[in-house]
């Protein structure tokens, strides 16, 4: 796994991530990457979205259904991993090439296309009619396919993809990524717009998309909950100091957290460096506030849904 680079480097050279970070398991692909010119549309109505989210009931039917689906898929991943451990399987030392992939699929998945059908209970399908059956948990080998939830043209989804590169050594990270992807059933996500040459705008459009804020907040809230399960609420300062002690503990996701913090706390530096207008400056601040708010709210999800 690539170590996250240091926070103090220049923005653009590290922290606002480059194209190579498509391999980062946190850049999950939701459908095509060609949603051009979408940033403005997504930012419009952003504050309204935050207010809407604040007023939602936390212990909704949707949260319960997501929790159930998480347990089903996590158990499937657990079983697969146990089988691999039993047979002495080591982590793949690079992205699976077609040969290694075919062998892995034949040995462990035993299904064409390397997809295992997830049995979705009727109660979950009723809550999420956008989940189409058969729904597959699939293990791709292309390096871009680091994890993602499929999006069909009609808005349905029928596949969750997981790249197994670090499956043996960093299973916790897979659970975090699984939380992220499942949140996209509720909050549709997006991908960085690689045609946008301004790196700040590229990642602003991606990380500040409401669906990505929701998904990343869920992912980081799970981390926090696993670290400090006794806390009554998420203390963002505590999360930051834990994070800055050793960013490598967060794996590649650390870059994303560093960027959210930077959006809100080093806004002026970014404005100067990227010559941002006032509107974009406000978007950065709103993005940060929304992220912190959603993070605290997501922590309550774990408090309420965990035994
Ligand atoms: Zn996402």
Image (cartoon, rainbow, N blue to C red):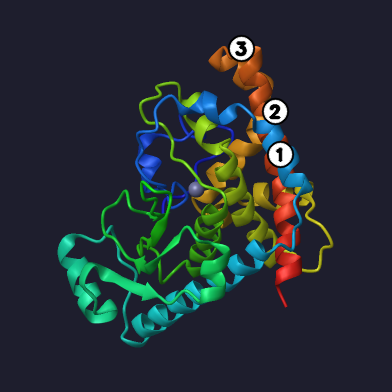
- Badge 2 crowding class, 10 Å Cα cut-off, few under 14, some 14 to 19, many 20 or more, is some
Residue 277 image label: 3
Tell me residue 42's x, y (percent): 55, 31
- Badge 1 crowding class, 10 Å Cα cut-off, few under 14, some 14 to 19, many 20 or more, is some
Question: Any atom of ligand 1 within 8 Å of the CB at mark 2?
Answer: no
Tell me residue 33's x, y (percent): 36, 38
**Numbered disc 2: secondary structure:** helix
**Numbered disc 1: secondary structure:** helix
Name the residue furthest bottom.
Answer: 86
Of circles 3 and 1, the one toward us is: 1
- Badge 3 crowding class, 10 Å Cα cut-off, few under 14, some 14 to 19, many 20 or more, is few
- Asked if 42 appears above or below 160 in the picture, the reply is above
Pointer 3 and pointer 1: residues touching (CB < 8 Å)?
no
Picture residue at 65% right of the left edge, 32% below the top: 46
Query: How far separated are the C-alphas under marks 3 and 2?
Result: 13 Å
User: In what quadrant of the picture does the C terminus appear?
Assistant: bottom right
Picture residue at 15% right of the left edge, 66% below the top: 99
Name the residue furthest left.
Answer: 99
Label whose residue precedes the other's in the sequence (3 or 1): 1
**Numbered disc 3: secondary structure:** loop
Picture residue at 71% right of the left edge, 45% below the top: 53
Label whose residue precedes the other's in the sequence (2 or 1): 1
Label whose residue precedes the other's in the sequence (3 or 2): 3
Residue 285 image label: 2
Name the residue furthest right.
Answer: 232
Kindly identify which residue carries mark 1. 50
Query: How far separated are the C-alphas under marks 2 and 1?
Result: 13 Å
């Amino acid at each position: 796994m690539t170590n996250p680079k240091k926070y103090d480097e220049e923005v653009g050279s590290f922290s606002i991530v480059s194209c190579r970070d498509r391999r980062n398991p946190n850049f999950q692909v939701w459908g095509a990457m060609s949603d051009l010119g979408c940033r403005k549309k997504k930012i419009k109505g952003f504050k309204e979205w935050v207010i809407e989210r604040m007023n939602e009931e936390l212990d909704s039917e949707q949260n319960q259904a997501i929790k159930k689906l998480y347990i089903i898929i996590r158990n499937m991943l657990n079983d697969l991993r146990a089988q691999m451990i039993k047979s002495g399987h080591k982590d793949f030392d690079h992205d699976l090439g077609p040969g290694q992939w075919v062998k892995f699929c034949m040995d462990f998945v035993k299904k064409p296309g390397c997809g295992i059908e997830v049995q979705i209970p009727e109660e979950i399908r009723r809550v999420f009619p956008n989940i189409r059956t058969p729904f597959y948990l699939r293990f791709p080998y292309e390096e871009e396919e680091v994890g993602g939830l499929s999006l069909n043209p009609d808005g349905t989804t029928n596949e969750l993809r997981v790249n197994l590169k670090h499956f043996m050594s960093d299973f916790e990270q897979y659970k975090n990524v699984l939380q992220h992807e499942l949140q996209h059933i509720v909050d549709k996500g997006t991908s960085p717009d690689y045609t946008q040459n301004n790196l700040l705008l590229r990642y602003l459009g991606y990380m500040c998309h409401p669906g990505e804020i929701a998904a990343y907040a869920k992912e980081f809230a799970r981390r926090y909950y696993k670290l400090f399960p006794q806390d009554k609420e998420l203390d963002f300062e505590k999360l930051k100091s834990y994070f800055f002690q050793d960013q490598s503990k967060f794996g590649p996701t650390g870059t994303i957290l560093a960027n959210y913090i930077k959006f809100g706390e080093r806004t002026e530096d970014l404005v100067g460096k990227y010559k941002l207008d006032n509107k974009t400056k406000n978007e950065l601040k709103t993005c940060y506030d929304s992220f912190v708010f959603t993070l605290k709210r997501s922590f309550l999800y774990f408090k309420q849904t965990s035994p």
